[in-house]
């Protein structure tokens, strides 16, 4: 059973505050609590600030009777500059230590050996950067960069992780005023350095090798139907 509440306020022009909280009751007399606060401030000259603070003392796997919950406090913030043709954002985050239980079933092995659990993480700091350049109407060059600054990152968070994307989008057939036809094409490159990918049954770290992947994505939208084709190498 869970009880949840949320609230959004705009006390003054340009300032937005939002928050939500949840209390959960589990079996065997266990319970969990989560709270999240967010704030955004619009400044002159196209600048803006935003930040998030998340507190939790909750369970990872309520069906596991040995799960007693963990307490974490995570925070993030960024400054953003927007123009009609350019957007830039620089930010940072901190994350509390955390001890994961098991290994997510949705993540498959990266080689012939299967990781059985994720590595415990220590307090970490992160640097993030985002940018978008509108080259022509409907044509945009964008990218982001992510770098954990402590111990080279945690599992599946390799240092120097970046993505660059060139995207074309157009409602090319305007026979109907509703613009139900749209075409989107994307050419992207995703690259990351060497990292870790969990712990195997012997207690050894599984290595996530460095890689660079090229992607081609094409989407054709017709009313409520989307036809897409994706390829990665």
Image (cartoon, helix red, strand yellow):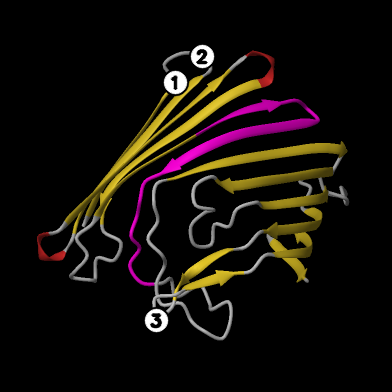
Q: Can you identify the residue that label 1 sits on?
A: 10
Q: Is residue 223 visible?
A: no
Q: Can you identify the residue that label 3 sits on?
A: 201
Q: Can you identify the residue that label 2 sits on?
A: 13
Q: CA distance from mark 1 to mark 3?
A: 52 Å
Residue 75 lies in quadrant: top left
Q: Earlier in the sequence, mark 2 or mark 3?
A: 2
Callout 2 secondary element: loop
- Label 2 with label 3: CB-CB less than 8 Å: no
- The residue sitting at 53% across, 62% down in the picture is 156
Classed neighbour count for the residue bearing mark 2: other residues with Cα under 10 Å, few (<14), some (14–19), many (≥20)? few
Above/below status of 2 relative to 67: above
- Label 1 with label 3: CB-CB less than 8 Å: no
Residue 229 colored in magenta in the image: no
Above/below status of 226 relative to 135: below
Q: Main secondary structure of the magenta part?
A: strand
Query: Magenta region: which residues?
Result: 77-102
- The residue sitting at 58% across, 81% down in the picture is 111
Above/below status of 94 relative to 206: above
Q: Quadrant of the C terminus?
A: bottom right
Front one among 47 and 184: 47
70 left or right, relative to 199: left
Front one among 215 and 209: 209
Q: Position of residue 163 (x, y in %)?
A: 71, 52
Q: CA distance from mark 1 to mark 2?
A: 7 Å
Front one among 163 and 207: 207
Q: Is residue 127 visible?
A: yes
Q: Quadrant of the N terminus?
A: bottom left
Classed neighbour count for the residue bearing mark 1: other residues with Cα under 10 Å, few (<14), some (14–19), many (≥20)? few
Q: Position of residue 145 (x, y in %)?
A: 66, 46
């Amino acid at each position: 059973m869970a009880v949840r509440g949320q609230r959004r306020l705009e006390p003054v022009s340009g300032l937005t505050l939002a928050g939500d909280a949840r209390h959960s009751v589990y079996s065997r007399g266990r319970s969990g609590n989560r709270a999240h606060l967010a704030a955004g401030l619009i400044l002159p000259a196209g600048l803006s600030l935003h930040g998030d603070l998340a507190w939790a003392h909750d369970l990872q796997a309520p069906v596991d009777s040995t799960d007693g919950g963990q307490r974490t406090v995570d925070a993030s913030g960024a400054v953003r500059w927007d123009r009609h043709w350019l957007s830039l954002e620089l930010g940072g985050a901190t994350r509390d230590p955390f001890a994961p239980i098991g290994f997510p079933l949705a993540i498959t092995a990266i080689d012939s050996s299967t990781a059985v659990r994720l590595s415990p993480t220590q307090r970490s700091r992160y640097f993030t950067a985002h940018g978008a350049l509108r080259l022509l109407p409907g044509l945009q060059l964008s990218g982001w960069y992510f770098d954990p600054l402590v111990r080279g990152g945690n599992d599946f968070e390799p240092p120097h992780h970046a993505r660059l994307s060139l995207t074309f989008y157009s409602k090319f057939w305007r026979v109907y005023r509703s613009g139900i036809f749209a075409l989107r094409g994307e050419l992207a490159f995703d690259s990351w350095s060497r990292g870790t990918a969990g712990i195997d049954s012997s207690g050894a770290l599984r290595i996530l090798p460095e890689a660079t992947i090229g992607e081609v994505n094409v989407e054709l939208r017709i009313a409520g139907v989307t036809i897409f084709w994706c390829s990665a190498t």
